[in-house]
């Protein structure tokens, strides 16, 4: 029994000595390295990294969705503005054509009087056009496509051959750019027939309808116009 007691006492003493040595080492390490005072477990755990990645994925998905919707809204807005521009050009042509006057064009001769010269994609007529703020004047008007634009040319009406040959006062105004096609049709009021050419020089057509097509940013926009000529049925007009 005394031997066992002695052995147990030795083991216990050795344990105390090991603990004392461990505490001394720990105290020495703490004094030499203050950072050792912090928790021995530092940094991010795996669950923290996974949660962070999940949050980044959710935010990225929301940003992609938002940017896609923003691009769609911008595209819709641009398309709407472009369609409004094409419609405005169509309304302008409708107003100009409806005010056509039953007057001879300057290239007319006594034997060949021409009130309106019209083809599938161009026409000429006389009408009242605005020339400034609050003022207007009689002009010979030509509507024709030029360099992918629909152009309106205003020729002053001063009378005489010199005025017809003088092009310095002609005013060419691009109505709309990017025109890919324009198609005019003319209504013969006497027969009720539409045609792509107007061949009755001494009469104005009862109405003119047209279609304007414009390409912009890879998209095509179209607008239909219709103009009823108010002076198409003047009495005394005769066909050639």
Image (cartoon, rainbow, N blue to C red):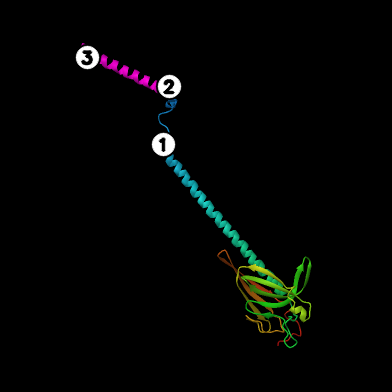
User: Is disc 3 placed on a helix, strand or loop?
Assistant: helix
Q: Nearer the viewer, residue 93 or 170?
A: 170
Quarter of the image with the N terminus is top left
User: Is disc 2 placed on a helix, strand or loop?
Assistant: helix
Question: Callout 2: few (<14), some (14-19), or many (20+) C-alpha neighbours within 10 Å?
Answer: few
Contact, mark 3 vs mark 2 (Cβ under 8 Å): no
Q: Which residue is drawn at 35% across and 18% down?
A: 20
Q: Which residue is drawn at 46% across and 41% down?
A: 52
Quadrant in the picture for residue 150: bottom right
In the rendering, which numbered label is found on residue 31?
2
Q: Which of 231 and 166 is in front in this view?
A: 166
Q: In this view, does 13 lie above or below 121?
A: above
Q: In this view, does 202 lie above or below 136?
A: below
Magenta portion: prevailing SS class: helix
Q: Which residue is drawn at 74% across and 79% down?
A: 165
Question: Callout 3: few (<14), some (14-19), or many (20+) C-alpha neighbours within 10 Å?
Answer: few
Q: Position of residue 99 (x, y in %)?
A: 73, 74
Identify the residue position indicated by label 3 in the image: 4
Q: Is residue 31 above or below residue 127?
A: above
- Please tell me whether residue 89 belongs to the stretch shown in magenta: no
Q: How far apart are marks 1 and 3 (CA)?
A: 49 Å
Viewer can see residue 56: yes
Q: Which of 198 and 42 is in front in this view?
A: 42
Q: Earlier in the sequence, mark 3 or mark 2?
A: 3
Identify the residue position indicated by label 1 in the image: 45
Q: Which residues make up the magenta segment?
A: 1-29
Q: Earlier in the sequence, mark 1 or mark 2?
A: 2
């Amino acid at each position: 029994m005394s031997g066992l007691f002695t052995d147990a006492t030795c083991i216990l003493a050795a344990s105390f000595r090991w603990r004392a040595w461990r505490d001394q080492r720990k105290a020495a390490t703490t004094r030499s390295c203050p950072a050792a005072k912090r928790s021995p477990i530092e940094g991010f755990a795996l669950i923290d990294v996974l949660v962070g990645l999940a949050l980044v994925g959710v935010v990225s998905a929301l940003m992609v969705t938002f940017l896609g919707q923003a691009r769609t809204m911008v595209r819709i807005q641009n398309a709407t503005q472009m369609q409004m521009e094409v419609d405005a050009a169509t309304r302008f042509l409708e107003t100009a054509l409806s005010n056509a006057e039953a007057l001879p064009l300057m290239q007319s001769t006594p034997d060949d009087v021409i009130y309106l010269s019209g083809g599938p994609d161009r026409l000429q007529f006389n009408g009242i056009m605005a020339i400034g703020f609050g003022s207007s004047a009689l002009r010979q008007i030509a509507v024709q496509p030029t360099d992918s634009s629909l152009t309106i040319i205003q020729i002053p009406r001063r009378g005489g051959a010199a005025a017809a040959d003088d092009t310095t006062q002609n005013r060419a105004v691009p109505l709309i750019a990017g025109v890919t096609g324009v198609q005019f049709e003319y209504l013969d009021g006497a027969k009720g027939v539409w045609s792509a050419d107007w061949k009755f020089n001494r009469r104005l057509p009862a109405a003119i309808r047209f279609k304007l097509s414009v390409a912009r940013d890879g998209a095509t926009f179209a607008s239909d116009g219709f103009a009823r000529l108010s002076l198409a049925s003047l009495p005394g007009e005769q066909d050639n």
